[in-house]
Image (cartoon, coloured by chain):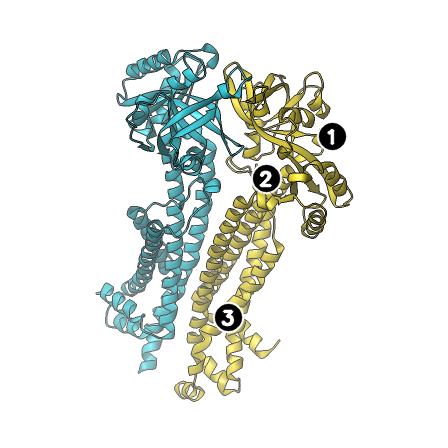
Amino acid sequence: MKYFIANRIFLKSFRWSQSGWIQMLAILGITFSVMVTVMVISVLQGFEKSYEKSLLGFNSHLVIFSDPDLHMNSVDLKKEISQIMDELDQDKKYAISSFVFKPGIFIKSGKLKTITLKGIDFEEVRKVYEMDMTLFSKNNEKSHLPEIILGSSFYENEIKPKNNISLWLPQSQFKNLNQNFKQFQVKGIFHSGLHEFDYGFALIDRKDLAKLLGSDDLPLGVEMRISDYTQAEDLAKKLREKLPMHYEIIPWNQLNQSLFEAMKLEKVTFLVIMILIVMISSFNIMGVCLLVFLKEMKTFFLIYCLGLKWSSVKRIIYSIGGLYGLVGSFLGVIMANGILWSLSYWKWFSLDPEVYFVDQIPMTINFFRDFIIVVFVVMICLLIAKFSIYQFNRKESHLWLRNQI
Amino acid sequence: MKATQFISHRYLFSKSKGSILSLLTMTAILGISISIVTFILIHTVMTGFRQSLQEKIIGIDSHFSITLDGEAQNQYEEVVKELENFSEVDFINDVVDFEGMIKLSENHFASVKVRGIHPQNCFKLDKWNIIFFSDFSCDDLSSRDMPGILLGEEKFFELGLIPGYPALVTVVNPIADIGPSGELESKFKEYRVMGIFETGYFNRDSQYGLVGFNSAQNLIHYDPTYRKIQVFLKSLDHSFVLTDIINELKNNYKNIKISLWKDQNQRLFSALKLERIGMNLLLGMVIFIASFNVICLISLLIQRKYNDTGILRALGLSQKQLYQIYANMGLYLGGLGTLIGGLISVIIIMFLKMADISLPSAYYLDHLPMKVDYQVVIIAIIISPFLSYGVSILASSKLKTVQPHEVIRRKS
């Protein structure tokens, strides 16, 4: 019955009156704060996920460098690591590609642009790297040119609609520039999601790159993809114990440690701000509870005199506080998700990829997270309501009854 | 003290008004204080970030740079002389910039942006934080035996060089010259790594190499399109000086291109501006939500003091004076909350300045920058109490319904 009364009083508060207006303001405050909280957390998580996806896609889960002075053959390098992985026997599902970085220069209208060529095993590209890749259909006549996969931004801005690219590659001989210019056929484009990769990198078969640079092999290290990327750090520890000293093993999160540290710092800062906003808005609940008590004093004292326990009367007011929190946070979640959805659907707001690395605001829509936020806000509201009704005095009921008589 | 002020003060801070209302008064003040602290702190960090970045960028890349086109390309020396006449100009850095390659060993190449500078200016580039190995100095940049090169800290470690060891590297300009058969030829020159620089700006530290002006000119085969004049002014606040200099230069030289530091970093500063607007909106909303507490408190007070209000009205207080009582309360709440918030902010800012919190390397800056934007802070401090004042007037609308005879009849 007490919840029925609480519900009735709560619904009654929406009638157009001054106290109704104040109660609506209290709900509005919670709605705003929850909306901002959901949106900020969603965007921060979106950035984190977006960077994580791009970094994992482009660099794979684990990078193993060998000492360049040892001039290790890439086949031996891969063999040695595969043997250790088999010995470890913990993850049979893994893929390995050896890789090497070489700089190249692209010249367009007299202007130079440095591009980093990432030599990888083309046959392993789909197994090791998780990027979106569009491969162009081959021409009928077989091209003798080495193939290259360009970053989407670079292709769109510099190459399109051509299918060939000429790059200046450094070689020991600097005498004749034409000897250093190498023609490539564009095999396709990749989209990592990060502008830095999509504009500054190109993928090429490691063997082709070695041939172009007049070398037999160009091993720098290997990249490994495992079935569960969260295990990369543990696996790196195990590999460090098994592999000789001249190997450097770096899991994906360590490779970009400073970026993730910065994001963590921002997340903590924003979380503190959001908690403060929610706290300020929930202070309204205290006033609203008192307002409800004063407004409905007659009802409360009457039902108390009719035999309802004072603790139950308190629970009614307490439930009203919770209902305000629930309605406010629910509306906030709906509004936030509506705005986020419209942002992702109509893309009415874009970012500068050279500053943020992504061109659209990344976001995550997660109803479980929203549910947790709602629960958290309702808990705070209940707590504040409980605190505010703590001091309501039942003794006043006798005074009130006496006045009525 | 006026009667209205006296009554407002008594209503708000009286001990006898009941503990729950005291609690509400406290939460209203607390809400305003928290919102003011959040506003001032975040604004201080954002302003500090913007200013530090601006100082760093200007220190690295100058206030503005000049390039000359067409016939004017031979007038660089004249432009430099003219610029030297301006007393506000600190120094002029005549540079050549080109994109090239750096060769460490037979198969070890990396890209590099080469900047040729005059050795005498090397001393003045304090924001580049140049560290020389052993006995090298700026003059060695243009040494005749073996010219020196200074590499950005990130580039230096990317190349796997050992600090302190003056390694030999070759700098290559891929399209430098036209050979006897009419084909483009590369040009290259050997340099000794004589130090590193650390601007703290990843873009510079990971891409740039500084060499002597003359040796860089040899590598570009005196192509004037690579040359530019960087102008550093004495003061960071330069808006008036800058307009004068630019106007005079534009009048004297027709094919002159002037690029301001703001234009060169337009994207970064637009992004910062956007973030600032977003953050101000968010913080403004926090203050707005905090003012809801004031509305609630004033409404409750009106409800509780309904009889008193009727009596005051019967005693001769005008409607306007009644409004004034409750509006004053809003002003007191806002003023007190702002004062407490302001004081807490000062303490936190002082603490953060002393603590010198370091930032992850993904940021452009090493330490958390703090710079109080007094203009914005004063505006916030003024607006906050008046916002409370305004919402109190809104909340006092119920006073219109107060009927003195009704109250007196009920009381008797």
Q: Is residue B13 visible?
A: no
Colour for chain B in the figure: yellow
**Residue B409 at x, y = what percent?**
40, 88
Query: How far apart are the two marked residues, 3 and 1, measured between alpha carbons?
Result: 62 Å
- Residue type at tag 1: Gln
In the picture as drawn, the residue positioned furthest to the front comes out as B181
The tag earlier along the polypeptide, 3 or 2, is 2
| Same-subunit check for callouts 3 and 2 | yes
User: Which of the two labelled residues, at mark 3 and mark 1, occupies the earlier sequence position?
Assistant: 1
Residue drawn 35% across the image and 59% down it: A386
Q: Nearer the viewer, residue A297 or A26?
A: A26
* Left or right of residue A375, residue A153 in this image: right
Q: Residues within 10 Å of mark 3 (few under 14, many from 20)?
A: some
Q: In the image shown, does A204 or A362 lie closer to the viewer? A: A204
Q: Position of residue A176 (x, y in %)?
A: 54, 18
Display colour for chain A: cyan
Quadrant containing the N terminus of chain B in the rendered view: bottom right
| Image location (x, y in percent) of residue A398 | 33, 75
Do discs 3 and 1 belong to a common subunit?
Answer: yes
Q: CA distance from mark 1 to mark 2?
A: 34 Å
Q: Chain of mark 3?
A: B
- Residue in the picture at 39% in, 86% down: B410
Instruction: Name the chain letter of the residue that bears numbered label 1.
Output: B
